[in-house]
Each structure stands twice: as structure tokens, then as C-alpha cells.
């Protein structure tokens, strides 16, 4: 594989514009080679006796060529391009360096706050945890006093401090994992660009004959993106995560931190099983079609009922296979769907497992259909219980908490829950994407309602006509439910972002609800004898339904192409398309035609009042399949457009909300944010909306002191020792500046090198007897005049909160101590009622400070 292709395949998709433009540099080299070709000497030179006075040796010709190249505009343009690419790489790396520094500051404060929470036993630190679940349970405690004891016990169980702190620890672990992944991506970015510079300069020397690579590569080696202590920072993060969150279990820590290599496997048993299930399914489908064509199904009086039942159970499996094909295509074209859908890069279900699961369930569906078709040969009547048994098998498979695709099924259940309560939570991309999938599966929801109705009412021999006709209002509500979910999501997004195009999108789903309404009214009018052409009411409802269908089809088609896919851009190279595209150009035009043609099928499929009247079951099934196919094609370009939006903002990692809200240095208080619970995921289109922070304090530091002393209020009049929680956090932040060896010095040797028994609490910062207590000898080693040293603005972020204080870093620390520094806190403990040694026995001088503007970094 050529290096240009290797660079394209291994580059981080969201950062690809920031990589070395290797293709452009190769074009400049090609221009030099074309203008100054190298002369290849003859293998058998002629022997001449008369030498012309103008004769030039081969060496002289080559010297003239090299001189001409070095003075040419093409060579100067190439070197300028290399310098420009080097500046671009440095600029981007420094930007990411600054972001990582701010994230590091935030993680430092979070880890210190978590230590303080466990230090106080969790009872009083719960009030300082910024968690909507914790506060909701706290508010429930006020209500449970007026209700039964079972509510009191349930609330007490949920509000237990250890469970709350365990959830915050898990959240902080996720933040560390994303930060580590960000550093790992920066390392890959640095190494790949370094290799690109090396390759292009070697190629330059080979083409031109000049020896410019030593000079240029020396400049590259001295560039900031190469001199940064990135490897050192990565090792420190690994050590801190291992010691503080995994209690020395490095193997478990690295399993959580490292992202496995995402590479295609040449063979996998899941792929082999997928082929077997697919062959079995298509073989069964062929036999089923042959039996249907021979009119054997028509001999059964209940064939319409069973057809509707099996149709509603097959289409979700087909949609699952379609999504698996979407995932394969996104992966092939480097679309980071894992980030877009909020999945874990370390553990997520791949497309092979999804296809295998779809094939297996389709094979089970085929067996159930065979049992119905050949029930005479089996000697027993299996309908309608064969379809009901199949439904139970599918529900049990998706509801089981173990087995394959466990994380995918949990993700689906979580997103469905968020979708169902759309107006109450901030809307993420996966929320409205799944709601759009449900809009294409309206017929499936109606068929499920039909199955429940037939089984519960016993309307089986009557071909289910009562379930179709007497439940028009319920069927209309079910048909409009997906559009209602999307309408609520659009209104919630408008409330969060104040962007009016969400209102325009809400109008699109409102028109869908109007289509459902007019079709239902027309069906009711038909039942009352008001037929089209004979009754003015029936005719008017039919005309209104036609107009609503036309408006909805045109509106939705335009929204698909313009807003969801981002087409019809002004700066597009190709007509009606956009500037950036990942798929081949002809595919876009075919997709546009596909969306326009099959959009009408969706409008007809939600017209529940009319397809029961005018359309046969086979035609409804065909229209529903067309809509699923349109959604299948729509997924390719919708996720691609979202990926390009992420690329425009260089967003390659998830934003993990922090469990604690850290206060600035000047406030001296600990903030409990009441208004930023649900804003962490409102950046689907690159808009990060941050609400104003609200300080929950009483008199001065009363809230903090009251929380620690047990009052939980803001009056600050609690009994007992008066402790400044902010001072405790500051002192713990200083302790994080110690090396891992310093941390191990606090832990007895019997706990080192082996994993202790797991306690209920997930905090593994050290044995309980060594946390928060110190003997007199330990207190004597603590310098009471501890100060916080800063670092200069030109330092790398790697001189971070986890800076090592070991002997190997003594020289670096002494050099940094000579530079200008700023104090982290002018006064660490304002009340001076808590000795530093009582909080942590390893508090020493801090070798690092962070910039003032980084105190409240937004991760």
C-alpha cells in the first residue's frame, strides 16, 4: 500500500484536514521531476578520440541540474509548502494541547473532590455532587414522609451515599477514559505526521538529488508537536488511574483505558454463522413464496390475520439487517458512527454480530411460518399461537440481560426510554435518529397492536375486522406516535438552542399528524355511510387528505435533501450537492431520486384510515418495505452529514459530564450547579449551550461548612469542627502532584502489587485506615509553609497535575522552579482549623499550577 493511502486510512477522520497534505506535496514534486528530469547515463559509453572543448562530464551536468533545481520556483514552492504544512500541524497540535491542559485541570479537581467525598464518608459530600439523579432522589425524600413505609425504604435505598458516590466514580472513570483516548489520538496524530514529513523529504531527495531532508527533518524534530512530553503524560495518566481508581491493578486499568485496534478480520465464526442463517432464511422464503403462489394459503380462512401478524414481526428484523449494512458502509468510508451514536469505542457491537443476530432471528421467523403453513401435516392447529409464540421469543431475546449484543440491547432500551419522554430530557443525536427509524416502522406498530387485539378479544375467525374498524382512534394514535415523539424533540431542541429551524422541523411532523387525522376522519365517515363522491363530508375529507399528503411529501422531501443531507450547497463542486462528500458522486444523485420516489409511500403508510379501505394487505406490505428501504438509504447520508459537521469542528471525543462542579479560585466555595444537568449533550450540531452557573451558598461559606458538618443546609451553624471543604479539595489537589511512588508510600506494603477484596464503594484511593488520618510522625514530615508553584505559559500541558516528584524528575522540577510562577491559592485553608497532615499525609510542595482562565474548564 502506498503511504498516501496509508495516511488516509489511518488518519483520524475528524482531524483529517489538519494532517499533512501529502497529496499536494507529491504534486509539487512531480512538477519538479517533469521540469528537471534526471539524465540516465549510457551503460556502454562510446569511446571517442576527439574530445570537443565544450564537452561536459556527467558530474558537471548533474551539478548544473542541481543548481538549477535549487534556484527554481518549483523548489521554493515545495519548501514553502512543507513549511506551511509544518505550521499547520504545529498550530493544530498546540490547540489540542491547550484543550487537553484544561481537561487535565478539571480531572484534577474532580479526583480531588471525589477523594474528599470518600474522606468524609459520603454522608455530607452528597450535597456537593452535581447529579440530577442524586438531587431528584433528595427531593423525593421530602415527599416520602407523607406516603407509605415502602416508599421510605425505597428512597433510603436509592439515596444511600455509597450508591451515589459509586455512580459518580463510574462517571469520573469514563471522563478519564475519554481523556486518555484523546491523548492516544494525539500520539497517533503526531507519529503519522512525523512519518509523512520523513517520507516526503526522502522522496524529494530521491527525485531532485538534493540533500535537504536532514535540514528539514531536524526542523520537524524540533517542532512543538514533536518535543511535547506526550508519552510522559500518557504514562502518568495510566499510573494515576491505576493507583487512584483501580488500586494498583494495572491489567484491569489498561483494559479500561486502551482502545482495541479496529481492523477487519479475515475470518470470523460469526461471519460463517451469518452465511448459514442467511442461506437458511432465503431457502425458506423461496418455499414460502412457492406455497403462496400455489394458493395454498388462500385455503386458510385466517390467512389475512396471520399475514398481518407475521409482517409486523419480520420488518424489524429486516430493519436490523439494514442498520448493520449501514454500519459496514460507515466503517468502510471512515464515518465515525461510534462517536455520533454515543457508543464506547472500547466495547460496542459491530456489524457482523448484528447481521448474525438478524439472520438467526429471521431463521426463527421462517420456522414459525413453516409451522403455520404445514399445520395440516403436523396434525394440530397452531394459528394464531405460532405468531404469538414467535413474538414471545423475540421479546425474550431482546429483554434478556446476558448473551450476545448485550450492550447494544441495553443501548436500545436506554434510547427508547429517552425518546418516550422526549420533552423532559435534552435531545441527543441517537434519540431523534431512533425516533426517525420508528417513523418508518409505523406499520409494524400497527401490526403489533393488531396482534394484541386479536389475541385478547378472540376476534380470530372474523378475520380481525373488528380490530381494524372498531379501534380506529387507537390505531390513529399509534400511527401518529412516532411523529409526536419527533415533534416533542424538536420543541425541546428549540427550547435548548433557540434556533428556529427546529420549529420548521416541528412543522414537518405536525403535517404528518395532520395526514393521520384526516385519513382517520375519512375512515370514520366511510363507516357512517358518507362515501366519497356521494357525501359532501366524505368528499371534503378525501380532498383534505390528498392536500395534506402532497404538502407533507414535498415538505419532508425538501427537508431530507437540504437539512438532513446538507445538499444544495452554494459552494458545491457538483450541481445540487455539497462541497465535502465521502461517497462516490453518482450515489448522491441516485439517492436523491430514491428519496423523492419513495417518500410518497411513507405518507400513504401512515394513512391508517385509507389503507384499510383501498389497499390490500400485500400492497400495504410493499409500501412499508419501500419506506424501510428509503430510510435505509437516508441513514447513509444523514450520519455522513453529522460526521462532516464533527470534522468541521475537529470533534473526535465525547464530552463526559463531570460529577462535581468545581469553583474558581477566587470564590472559595464549592458550586452545586442546578441548571447544567441536561445541557451536556445539546451539541449535536456543534452548539455547546451552557446555562449560567448558580452558587448555592448561605452566609459566606455556610453551605460548604454546613455540608461537611452534617447540617446539609446553608446556614453554616453546624455543630462540631468547622471545616472549609474548598480547602480540603485544594490540599488534595496538591497531593495529586505527588508521584505514584509517593502515593504508594501512603499505602501499606501488604496492599501493594495485589488486588484487595472489592468493597462496596468503588473508591480505591487507599485503605480506609490510612485515608484522612495521620500519626504524629507523619505530620512532622509535612511542611506547614507549603506553597503552590506555577509554570510558564510556554510549557506543555504535560507538566500537569500528575507531575512526578521522583528523583528522575528533580532536574526538570528545579528548572521549572526558576521560571515565573503564580500561586494556586493565596490562602489554602482560610479557617486554619484543619492541619494539612490530618487531611492527607503526603501533601508536599506542588510543582505545577494552572492558568487562572483554566479553573473552570468545560469538558
Image (spheres, helix red, strand yellow):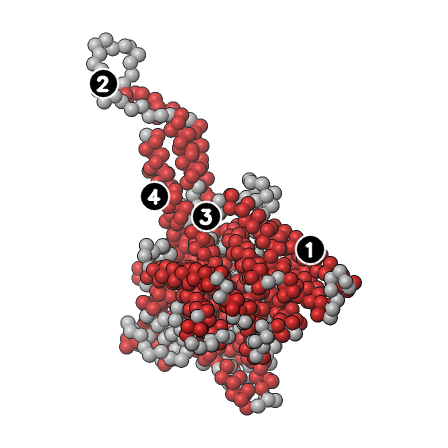
Q: Is residue 181 left or right of residue 209?
A: right
Quickly name the residue at label 3. Answer: 16
The label number, if any, that marks residue 551 in the structure image: 1
Q: CA distance from mark 2 to mark 4?
A: 38 Å
- Mark 2, Cα crowd under 10 Å, few <14 / some 14-19 / many 20+, is few
Q: Which mark is residue 483?
A: none
Question: Of the residues tagged 1 and 2, which is closer to the observer?
Answer: 1
Q: Earlier in the sequence, mark 2 or mark 4?
A: 4
Residue shown at 60% from the left, 66% from the top: 482
The secondary element bearing badge 3 is classed as helix
Q: Earlier in the sequence, mark 2 or mark 3?
A: 3
Left or right of residue 437, residue 821 in this image: left
Mark 1–mark 2 CB contact (< 8 Å): no
Foreground: disc 2 or disc 4? 4
Most extreme residue toward the top, as rendered?
A: 50
Gap in Å between the C-alphas at discs 2 and 3? Answer: 50 Å
Q: Position of residue 774 (x, y in %)?
A: 37, 79
Q: Which residue is mark 2?
A: 45
- Do residues under tags 1 and 4 come within 8 Å of each other at their CB atoms? no
Amino acid at each position: 500500500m502506498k503511504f498516501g493511502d496509508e495516511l488516509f486510512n489511518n488518519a483520524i477522520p475528524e482531524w483529517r484536514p489538519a494532517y499533512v497534505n501529502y497529496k499536494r506535496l507529491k504534486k509539487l514534486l512531480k512538477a519538479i521531476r517533469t521540469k528537471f528530469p534526471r539524465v540516465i547515463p549510457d551503460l556502454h559509453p562510446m569511446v571517442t578520440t576527439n574530445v570537443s572543448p565544450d564537452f561536459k562530464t556527467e558530474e558537471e551536468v548533474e551539478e548544473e541540474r542541481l543548481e538549477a533545481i535549487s534556484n527554481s520556483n518549483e523548489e521554493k514552492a515545495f519548501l514553502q509548502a512543507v513549511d506551511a504544512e509544518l505550521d499547520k500541524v504545529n498550530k493544530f497540535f498546540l490547540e489540542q494541547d491547550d484543550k487537553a491542559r484544561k481537561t487535565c485541570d478539571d480531572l484534577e479537581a474532580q479526583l480531588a473532590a471525589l477523594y474528599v467525598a470518600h474522606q468524609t464518608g459520603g454522608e455530607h459530600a452528597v450535597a456537593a455532587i452535581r447529579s440530577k439523579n442524586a438531587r431528584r432522589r433528595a427531593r423525593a425524600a421530602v415527599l416520602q414522609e407523607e406516603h407509605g413505609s415502602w416508599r421510605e425504604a425505597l428512597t433510603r435505598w436509592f439515596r444511600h451515599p455509597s450508591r451515589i458516590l459509586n455512580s459518580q466514580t463510574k462517571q469520573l472513570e469514563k471522563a478519564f477514559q475519554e481523556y486518555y483516548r484523546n491523548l492516544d489520538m494525539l500520539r497517533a496524530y503526531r507519529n503519522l505526521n512525523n512519518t509523512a514529513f520523513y517520507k516526503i523529504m526522502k522522496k524529494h531527495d530521491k527525485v531532485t538529488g538534493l540533500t535537504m531532508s536532514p535540514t528539514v527533518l531536524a526542523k520537524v524534530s524540533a517542532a512543538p508537536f514533536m518535543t511535547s512530553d506526550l508519552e510522559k503524560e500518557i504514562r502518568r495518566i495510566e499510573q494515576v488511574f491505576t493507583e487512584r481508581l483501580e488500586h494498583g491493578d494495572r491489567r484491569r486499568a489498561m483494559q479500561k483505558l486502551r482502545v482495541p485496534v479496529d481492523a477487519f478480520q479475515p475470518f470470523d465464526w460469526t461471519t460463517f454463522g451469518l452465511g448459514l442463517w442467511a442461506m437458511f432464511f432465503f431457502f425458506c422464503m423461496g418455499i414460502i413464496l412457492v406455497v403462496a403462489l400455489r394458493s395454498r394459503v388462500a385455503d386458510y380462512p385466517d390467512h389475512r390475520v396471520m399475514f398481518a401478524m407475521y409482517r409486523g414481526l419480520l420488518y424489524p428484523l429486516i430493519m436490523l439487517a439494514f442498520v448493520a449494512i449501514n454500519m459496514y458502509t460507515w466503517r468502510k468510508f471512515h464515518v465515525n458512527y461510534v462517536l455520533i451514536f454515543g457508543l464506547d469505542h472500547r466495547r460496542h457491537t459491530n456489524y457482523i454480530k448484528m447481521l448474525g443476530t438478524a439472520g438467526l432471528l429471521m431463521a426463527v421467523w421462517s420456522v414459525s411460518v413453516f409451522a403455520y403453513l404445514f399445520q395440516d401435516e403436523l396434525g394440530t392447529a397452531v394459528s394464531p399461537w405460532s405468531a404469538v409464540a414467535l413474538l414471545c421469543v423475540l421479546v425474550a431475546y431482546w429483554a434478556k440481560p446476558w448473551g450476545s449484543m448485550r450492550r447494544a440491547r441495553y443501548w436500545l432500551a436506554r434510547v427508547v426510554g429517552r425518546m418516550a419522554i422526549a420533552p423532559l430530557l435534552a435531545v441527543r443525536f441517537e434519540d431523534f435518529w431512533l425516533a426517525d427509524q420508528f417513523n418508518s416502522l409505523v406499520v409494524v406498530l400497527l401490526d403489533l397492536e393488531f396482534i394484541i387485539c386479536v389475541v385478547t378479544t378472540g376476534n380470530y375467525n372474523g378475520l380481525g375486522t373488528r380490530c381494524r374498524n372498531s379501534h380506529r382512534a387507537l390505531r390513529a394514535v399509534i400511527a401518529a406516535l412516532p411523529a409526536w415523539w419527533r415533534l416533542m424533540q424538536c420543541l425541546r431542541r428549540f427550547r435548548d438552542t433557540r434556533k428556529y429551524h427546529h420549529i420548521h422541523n416541528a412543522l414537518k411532523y405536525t403535517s404528518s399528524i395532520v395526514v393521520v387525522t384526516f385519513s382517520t376522519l375519512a375512515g370514520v365517515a366511510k363507516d357512517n355511510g358518507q362515501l366519497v363522491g356521494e357525501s359532501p363530508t366524505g368528499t371534503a375529507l378525501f380532498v383534505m387528505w390528498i392536500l395534506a399528503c402532497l404538502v407533507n411529501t414535498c415538505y419532508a422531501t425538501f427537508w431530507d435533501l437540504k437539512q438532513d443531507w446538507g445538499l444544495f450547497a452554494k459552494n458545491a463542486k457538483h450541481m445540487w450537492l455539497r462541497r465535502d462528500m465521502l461517497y462516490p458522486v453518482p450515489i448522491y444523485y441516485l439517492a436523491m431520486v430514491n428519496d423523492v420516489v419513495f417518500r410518497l409511500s411513507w405518507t400513504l403508510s401512515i394513512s391508517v384510515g385509507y389503507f384499510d379501505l383501498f389497499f390490500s394487505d400485500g400492497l400495504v406490505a410493499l409500501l412499508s418495505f419501500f419506506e424501510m428501504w428509503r430510510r435505509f438509504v437516508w441513514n447513509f447520508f444523514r450520519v455522513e452529514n453529522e460526521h462532516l459537521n464533527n470534522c468541521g469542528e475537529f470533534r473526535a471525543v465525547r464530552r463526559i459530564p463531570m460529577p462535581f462542579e468545581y469553583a474558581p479560585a477566587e470564590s472559595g466555595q464549592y458550586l452545586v450547579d442546578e441548571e447544567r444537568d441536561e445541557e451536556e449533550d445539546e451539541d449535536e450540531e456543534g452548539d455547546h449551550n451552557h446555562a449560567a452557573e448558580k452558587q448555592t451558598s448561605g452566609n459566606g461559606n455556610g453551605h460548604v461548612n454546613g455540608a461537611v458538618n452534617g447540617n446539609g443546609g446553608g446556614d453554616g451553624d453546624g455543630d462540631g469542627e468547622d471545616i472549609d471543604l474548598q480547602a480540603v479539595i485544594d490540599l488534595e489537589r496538591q497531593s495529586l502532584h505527588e508521584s505514584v511512588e509517593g502515593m504508594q508510600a501512603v499505602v501499606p506494603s501488604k496492599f501493594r502489587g495485589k488486588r484487595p477484596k472489592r468493597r462496596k464503594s468503588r473508591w480505591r484511593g487507599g485503605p480506609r485506615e490510612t485515608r484522612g488520618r495521620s500519626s504524629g510522625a507523619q505530620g512532622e514530615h509535612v511542611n506547614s509553609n507549603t506553597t503552590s508553584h506555577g509554570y510558564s505559559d510556554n510549557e506543555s500541558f504535560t507538566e500537569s497535575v500528575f507531575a512526578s516528584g521522583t528523583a528522575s524528575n528533580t532536574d526538570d522540577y528545579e528548572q521549572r522552579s526558576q521560571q515565573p510562577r503564580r500561586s494556586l491559592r493565596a490562602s489554602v485553608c482560610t479557617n486554619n482549623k484543619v492541619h494539612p497532615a490530618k487531611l492527607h499525609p503526603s501533601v508536599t510542595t506542588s510543582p505545577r499550577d494552572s492558568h487562572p482562565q483554566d479553573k473552570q474548564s468545560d469538558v
